[in-house]
Every structure is written in C-alpha cells, then in structure tokens.
Amino acid sequence: MIQDRIYNSQMECMDPEVRRKLQGERLRATVALEYANVPLYRERMDKAGIKPEDIHSMDDLKYLPFTEKTDLRDEFPFGLLAAPKDQIVRIQGSSGTTGKPIVSGYTENDVEVWTEMVARSLSAAGCTQDDIVQVCYGYGLFTGGLGAHQGASRLGAMTVPMSSGNTQRQIMMMRDLGSTILCCTPSYATYLGETIREMGLVPGKDIKLKSGVFGAEPWSEEMRVRIEELLGIDAIDIYGLTEIAGPGVAFECIAKHGMHVNEDHVIAEIIDPKTGEQLPYGTPGELVFTTITKTGQPMLRYRTHDICTLYNDPCPCGRTTVRMGRITGRTDDMLIIRGVNVFPSQIESVLVGINGVAPHYMLVVDRVNSSDTLEVKVELTEEMFSSDTVSHIEGISRQISEQIKSVVGIAAKVSLVPPKSIPRSEGKAKRIIDNRKI
Amino acid sequence: MFIKQVSVFLENTKGTLREVTQLLGENEINLLALSVADTSGFGIIRLIVKSGDIDKTLEILRNSGNIARVNDVICVRIPHKPMGLSEVLAVLEENNISVEYSYSFCRSTIDDAVIILRPSDKVLCAEALTKAGISLVSHDEVDAF
C-alpha cells in the first residue's frame, strides 16, 4: 500500500467556506484581468451587460459568459492572451475541432501553478524524492509529458523522460533503473503490463513499480483492476486539459473514489449542457472550468463537453476539495484515441481538402491489444478511380492517411469503400462506430 | 491499336465478385477475359467484353452503384508455346516499359495465346511491340474470338 502524502495541506485541506471566499477573490481578479486585456471577453461581458465590478463572489460566477473550444481556434494563436507576449514562457497545444490546433500560452506563474497541481497529484500517488518516475507520455506540445515531468521534478524524484513508444526499451529501462512510479495513458499501462507478463518478468521482483498515475483518456474501474493486477501497483486517475493547464487539474487520492479538483487554482462547475444552468453537486452534467490563478491565458467558464458529476461529501484522505467522478461521456462527438483528441470534423476537413474525395466517411474505433485503433472508411468516387491500378488506389489511401496524421496527429488506417456503402442517415449522420469496451 | 477494358472497384468482401458477374450475366454480357486484383481491403476487377457491349456494361455497373471506368490496354497475340510471353516482355524491358498488370483471355477460337498488358506507357509499348514484329490485337478481332 502506497502512502498518500498531501503536498499542500494548507490549500488542499482548507475549510470549504474559507476556500470559497478565496475563490471569489481570485475570480474577481481574473475577470478584471480578462476584461482589461482580452477583447473577446470584454465584448462578451459588455454584450451580457456585466462589468468586472459586478463580480463580487462565487455567487456571481453564473453571470459570466462561457468560453468554447472554437474560441481558442478562432483566436489562434495569441488572441486570448491576457499577458504581454514577452511574459509568455511556454506554449502547449492540442488538436482543435478542425485542422487548426489550439494553443495555450503560459507565463512563468502559470507553469508554476501547473507544476504545483501535478506535484500534488503525484504526491497523492506516494511520490517522494526517493522515487524513480518513468514518464511515458509524449513530450512536446501535448501537456502529458512535460506536465508529469515538471511535477515529478518538483517533488525531487528521479525523473525519467522516456516519452511515448518503444515498449521494449520502456520495459528495459523500467527494469534496469528500478522505476517505482509510472506515468502514461491507462491503455498504454495495460499494454506495458501485458508485455511485461509475456516476457516472463515478475512485478515486485523484476519490476519495482508501486503506483501509476494514468490519464489523458477515459477509463473504467475494470481497467483499474486489470492494470493493478498486471503491474502489481495502485493505479491512480489524473485529469486535465491543455486549455486549463494540463494534467493535474484534478487527481485521485489513494481512496480512489473521485478526483480532487485543485480548487484554489480552478473552479469546477457542472451545468446543464442545453440550458447552461448550474447544477447542484451530485447531479451529472457538463463540466465547466474557470482558472483563477493563471495570468497568461486564463479561461472563464470553459466548457469541456465532458460529462461527469461533482461530489462534495468528505473524503477519508482529509482533502476538502470537491471531487469529480469518472468522465461518462461527451456532449459533442469528440473521441479520445491513444490520448489524442479527435473530432470527426477534423477528419472531414482533411477529406474535403483532397481533390476528388467526397466527405462520405465513417470512423471505426476499436481497441486491439490494449491499444486504440482508428479506421477511416472513405467512399471512392469516379474521380479517385482515375487509374485502375492497385498502386494508384493505395496511393490515395496513403495520401489521406498522411494528411490525417499531420492534421490530427494520429495514425489511421484508411479504407476505401464502394460508393453508397456508408449509411446515410436522416438528420445527423452517424459518423462514428466505437467498438472499444472501456 | 488498343482495346477497351472495363474496370470495377469492389470491396474485398464475400459475394461481391459473384454479384457483379451475376449482374452482367443476367444482362447477357459475356466476359471474354477477366482479372481480379485483390488487396486486403479492396479488389479491382478488369473485364474485356465485346466492343458493342462496353457502354452497356458501364451503364449497368454504374446504375447499380459501382465505380467503374474504361481504359485502353494492349492486347497481343503470341505463339502458344514456352517462352512466348517472356519474349514479348523482353521487348518491353529493352524499351524501359514496365507492366502494371497482365492477364490472358479465357479462351479463343485461335491457336495463339492472347495476353492483355497494362504497360506504364501504352503508346511506347504499342510501338515497341509492333517494331519487334509482335502482332497487336484490335477490339474487332477480339469480338471475333
């Protein structure tokens, strides 16, 4: 059993009423910052007839306008910065809803806030300076790798920046270094566990892992049991998104029943996705975040489109923050495939950009050997059949696949299918078949 | 100089080849030659029909929702004996012409073998073969087989 250490007990175990007051003060400051520096927020607040002075406390949060992912796309790259560009020390990004990525600019303060949030998460998973943390999230614009890295370094742990892929090398290093904490996606953790078993290695003897902090994609209790059995560890959930900071926005403690939201840095709300009305704790709805300590690209009421429930009943760990349950779905058609956010609209924008390709497509997602697969079925047109050689047809598939890889950042198998073979439905087209059993 | 070939794109699933051949058969279209190129995901069927049937074949295929096209291929008549085909291919090689695919007629009323070639460059190919004394078969001749 790992020992859950509360990294910042002053903030994490604060009296909820006192915290709510602190959140109100920080919210007020953030709103003033946005209004003064970000034209989009100023326009929206003016339109809604709200001045920064109208925001006194948490009770006024509900009057603020929402922010959407499309706003980040439309204002790409620097339109939502609340700080001068010379104060931005980092850019992180993820895929947007169409071809364009979304980015977030971090001031030194924001990197610090993010690092603290991840440090709290890892500390809850038992991480100390005695640990060896193997980070197998991708390093780059994606927040997974650098986020985990910064958090582990903050705790003084020996941090191993493996990045993603090359399973044999991951396992060799894990074994030789004696890594004790693993950071990656839950599906990759399962794959690592299965491979370790196939190689005949024994967790506890050859593999020294004691816990793992897994996120970037939804998972289930069944997957937790499987990972814990395969690797002989405690598997801990972590949640985050680039728009808000990155991983660490919320994290599980060893009680493993809900992820504690870092409420001194972000405010979590649940709203009715149709009406936008706030919903009480215990009621499922759309998760909305407001950052209250960031200065580079703060977000007011950012709609995640993730569906979950918030709980505020006491947790045995001693933290007093609200907890979010597992993400049970989406209010839009976003898919998370191997930790990458994928929107059907991104695939569509790729297809319409290629000559002769009709936007009749279907995405088939599956999980094979613990790894997500994406197949894009595209209907062939007369134009695409301009030559009847196999190499020509395969060349088109390859071209589409390469474009998807460069725009969406994920490898997809492209299958060309006969015309009219993809069902046309009345109204909203059914574009996704998700065969994964998570 | 060339003969017309009809190509159809099909998904590589059970029954698709039978469906297409049945469809054409029910419409009294006889297949003079046929080749199937298959990959794990899709297949391309190439057909030779009588010249008078080409438009009808295309129409039937397209009306039933298939993607089909017509293109020119080379048809050569070669002695039905060992080395017959390799001598033709040697001519192409000497002229730097590659073969994308090739197949032969199901049957004919003549003793020679009849081979269909899809070369990288059909004009060059026709010239090279004619120069080498290899006789090209026209679609009219095909109709008479």
Image (spheres, coloured by chain):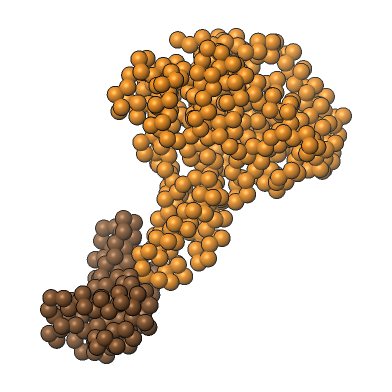
Chain colours: A orange, B brown
Tell me the residue at 31%/59% (across/down): B39
Residue B3 to residue A122: above or below: below
| Residue A394, x across and y down, in percent | 39, 60
Q: Report which quarter residue A260 is drawn in.
A: top right
Q: Specify whether A299 is left or right of A43.
A: left
Residue A299's place in the image compared with A209, above or below, is: below
Q: Give the residue displayed 51% in from the left and 32% down from the top.
A: A163
Question: Which one is in front, A163 or A375?
Answer: A163
Determine if residue A381 is in view: yes
Q: What's the residue at 52%, 40% (across, down)?
A: A340
Q: Nearer the viewer, residue A1 or B127?
A: B127
**Residue most extreme to the front:** B94
Percent of width and height locating residue A22: 76, 18
Position of the C terminus of chain A, as image quadrant, is top left
Q: Residue at x 40, y 63 (%)?
A: A393
Which picture quadrant has residue A71? top right
In the image, taking residue A155 as reference, residue A429 lies left or right, namely: left
Residue A309 visible within the image: no
Q: Is residue B135 left or right of residue A45?
A: left
Lateral position of residue A237 relative to residue A67, left or right: left
Q: Nearer the viewer, residue B82 or A57?
A: B82
Q: Residue A148: horizontal and vertical position, in percent?
A: 57, 26
Q: Tell how many labels.
A: 0
Figure check: B107 above or below A85: below
* Relative image position of residue B47 (x, y in whole percent): 28, 75
Q: Quadrant of the N terminus of chain A?
A: top left
